[in-house]
Image (cartoon, grey):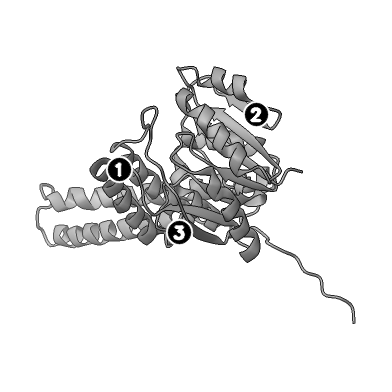
């Protein structure tokens, strides 16, 4: 088994491939590794350049169209055979020479994930750095996973952690949260970051809104994945209870001869009761779906790190 699998998602990076390959081969010369490129629907000559420059350590996965960076990472990780798996951007902004240092950090201190932290980030202030800082702060405070740089692609994982991340959608920014949910021990490591020389960045201000949407999903997954009834049932009971109190109050008024037909409070009470019933029903359905998910695939809602059997005395 190879020691390291390096997964590099690429899209329209034809001018970066040659210097990237040169740097990777120089940086990992003393490591037994495989390099997995995942082309995410490039429209330039990225695929042709990779094929021309590849050697027997390199592998290329070509998507039929653009599926997104998270899906590209997932495909590369699924193909990986190494004991350790690293992910790296293909735009030359991450530095492959940091990888041996990250491997040493992981092995010497027995971490499960070493996450890169770009101390001197070479990106635009207003469109990249400031939105990223805001997003990082919100993610830290919301999830309780205290990292400073969620957006750095350069990360190193033990194989069993990477293979069980469950990546889909656009959740690559939340990889540390997903890893933590699986019980991983995570540490940050200061890495170099270079300005982009060739090609065009695929990131923009619009991604901030996607990150916030994904954050809501992560909070649900983190807290209620195995017990969705606690969320939907709690909200449903609260809504139903407030609606019931309102309607009971109006019923008392009706008994004493007051007119309630034109009161907005009546509409609110009915809506709250119906909403409460719907939320409770949704909780039941979500519970059934989660039970089906685990039982049909023989999955468990827990991960065992180690089983120790004591020696007989």
Left or right, 59 with reference to 97: right
Residue depicted at 68% across the width and 46% down the height: 30
Residue depicted at 57% across the width and 62% down the height: 185
> In this rendering, is residue 60 above or below 150?
above
Residue 103 shows in this picture: yes
Where does label 3 land, which residue? 230
Residue 302 shows in this picture: no
Quick one: label 1 or label 3, which is nearer the N terminus? 1
Label 2: how many Cα within 10 Å (few below 14, some 14–19, many 20+): some
Q: Secondary structure at mark 3?
A: helix
* Quadrant assignment, res 312: bottom right
Q: Secondary structure at mark 1?
A: helix
Q: Quadrant of the C terminus?
A: bottom right
Where does label 2 land, which residue? 59
Where does label 1 land, which residue? 128
> In this rendering, is residue 154 above or below 51?
below
CA distance for labels 1 and 3: 37 Å
Quick one: label 3 or label 2, which is nearer the N terminus? 2
Q: Position of residue 59 (x, y in %)?
A: 65, 29
């Amino acid at each position: 088994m190879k020691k390291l699998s390096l997964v590099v998602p690429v899209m329209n990076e034809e001018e970066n491939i040659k210097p990237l390959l040169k740097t990777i081969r120089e940086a990992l010369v003393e490591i037994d590794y495989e390099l997995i490129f995942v082309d995410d629907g490039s429209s330039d000559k990225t695929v042709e350049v990779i094929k021309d420059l590849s050697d027997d350590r390199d592998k290329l996965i070509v998507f039929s169209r653009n599926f997104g960076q998270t899906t590209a990472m997932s495909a590369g990780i699924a193909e990986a055979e190494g004991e350790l798996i690293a992910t790296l951007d293909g735009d030359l902004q991450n530095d492959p020479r940091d990888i041996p240092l990250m491997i040493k950090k992981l092995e010497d201190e027995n971490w499960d994930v070493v996450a890169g932290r770009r101390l001197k980030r070479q990106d635009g202030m207003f469109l990249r750095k400031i939105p990223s800082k805001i997003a990082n702060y919100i993610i830290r405070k919301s999830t309780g996973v205290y990292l400073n740089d969620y957006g750095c692609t350069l990360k190193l994982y033990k194989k069993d952690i990477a293979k069980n991340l469950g990546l889909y959608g656009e959740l690559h920014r939340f990889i540390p949260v997903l890893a933590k949910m699986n019980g991983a021990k995570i540490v940050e490591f200061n890495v170099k970051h270079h300005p982009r020389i060739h090609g065009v960045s695929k990131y923009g201000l619009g991604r901030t809104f996607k990150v916030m949407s994904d954050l809501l999903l992560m909070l649900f997954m983190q807290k209620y994945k195995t017990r969705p009834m606690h969320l939907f049932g709690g909200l449903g009971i609260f809504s139903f209870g407030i609606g019931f109190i309102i309607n009971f109050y109006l019923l008392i008024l009706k008994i004493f001869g007051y007119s309630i037909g034109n009161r907005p409070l009546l509409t609110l009470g009915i809506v709250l009761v119906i909403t409460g019933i719907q939320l409770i029903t949704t909780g039941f359905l979500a519970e059934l779906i989660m039970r089906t998910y685990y039982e049909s695939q023989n999955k468990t809602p827990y991960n065992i790190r180690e089983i120790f059997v004591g020696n007989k005395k």
